[in-house]
Image (cartoon, grey):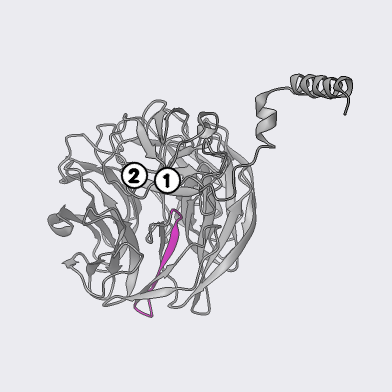
Amino acid sequence: MSMKRLLHSLLFLSSSILLLPSCDFLDDYIQPPKDTPAPYLLPATPLRNAPSVPRTSTLPLTFSSAIDPTTASAIKVFGTQLRGLRATTATVAGRTVSLAVAGGLFAGEPVSVSVPASVRGTNKRAVQPQVLQFTTAVTGPGRGTFITGSSVARNYGSGRHSLADIDNDGDLDLLFPLGGSLGVSSNQVAVRLNDGRGTYSGSTAVRVGNSGGDWAVATADLDSDGDLDLLAAGGGSNAVSVRLNDGRGNFGGGSEVPVLVTAYYLATADLDGDGDLDLVVHTNSNGQTVASVRLNQGNGTFGSGSEVAVPGGTGALTLGDVDSDGDLDLLTTGFSSGYIYTCRNQGNGTFGPPAPTLMPNNPAAVALADLDRDGDLDLLAGCAGSNTVETRLNNGQGQFAATGSSVTVGNYPEQLRLADLDSDGDLDLLTGNLYGGNVSVRFNTAGTFAGGSDVALGRNIYGLAIGDLDGDQDVDFVAGAEVASPLLRIVFNQ
């Protein structure tokens, strides 16, 4: 090649590079070496399954290799009681991403963090998607003794209620299914607003698509707009009603999400690691329990999904990463079979076959918590046949011990909740006892439960929701009870 032609070629190449819009354009074409490992969130991240994370602290996430600062904003923090998707500011220092949550988090609130594949390392590799969960700290005066406050009239039946700040004013409002005793159609959900001190008022009702009495009401930020939307399931309809919040507590639009058969329990979480909240519904047909999984399209509509068959009849469900692989697994109760079933997430929102853990008598409720502070989630089951809560420790790989501790509670513990009731940094136990007419409180001491009290509320107990009702930074509860008429009893921690 002549010197003149060589100089012409170099000049053309230099001019072409200068015309490229930015270095970011080149990044799309510069691929990392094939043997470069993808960054992943370290298993020892202190937030994972933590029972008492300070509400105003920065959330630290440590990865296996350095993270590209321009992608860290894709990490999502979801509250379950306050605002849903939280506004965050991400600061990156090598392998560590620190998330500052605008306005802090709510006392005693379960929180999840989603790290989707759109987060990348400085080596250009997409991170391995992961979801982790923790509970925020309580610092209020409550020490786990309870007094009953006001009551809210409700319908007959076993519909489950929900506590959430739906109007974004910083306190927890109350949502529950309406029905016959209040003289209205049963396919409505009542909304009662909190005055900030745990007193509820209002008469708003949201129409949902179910044809009969609703069994379950829940809230979650389904469209990732920073407020909590409404889900209602049950009542003889093979669908879950979704109603979207306008940010001021007004619900409209939404859709009916088809599920296999009548829905009894529901839960939301990021099951496929893409940064939005998906849906799991526990259904029952002819004694065969099926979990219907529906994946969020990112805007509160639900498309593809799957059905997970588990034996044992109607039962409750919970979601948590029991095998420490960064995705949320599904656990259901087999009331008639006597087992808790663990279905492991395959990382994409599909679940493997159920692995059984035997329980003594008719498990009716299930929950997960790190009881022995080793970083993994242990198993708790409310057993209606023995009036006990059974605990089984996790070996870190999602396998639970064949035996464990047991604590006696009230008659037929159908509802099971965990919260730090005495502000000592660990999660204590509450059970709603269907035929006992009370809520049992048992305190956590090094992973075993004892002491406490049984809070008498009426005859039968239907539904149990926990949260800071009066803004004093401790955990109170609302329980459905039959007295002279069906009521939701407001109960404060002292």
Q: Is residue 195 visible?
A: yes
| Residue drawn at (17%, 46%) of the image | 144
Mark 2 in CB contact with mark 1 (< 8 angstroms): yes
Q: Nearer the viewer, residue 461 or 472?
A: 472
As drawn, 203 above or below 180: above
* Residue 456 rendering spot, x and y as whole percentages: 20, 56
| Residue drawn at (45%, 36%) of the image | 66
Residue 45, numbered circle: 2
Reading the image, the residue beneath label 1 is 41
- Give the quadrant of residue 315: bottom left
Secondary element under disc 2, as helix, strand or loop, is: loop
Amino acid type assigned to the residue bearing label 1 in the image: Leu
Which residues fall within the magenta stretch?
Answer: 326-338
As drawn, 72 above or below 400: above
Marks 2 and 1 sit apart, C-alpha to C-alpha, by 7 Å
- Quadrant where the N terminus is found in the figure: top right
* Residue 161 rendering spot, x and y as whole percentages: 41, 51
Is residue 396 one of those drawn in magenta? no
111 to the left or right of 4: left
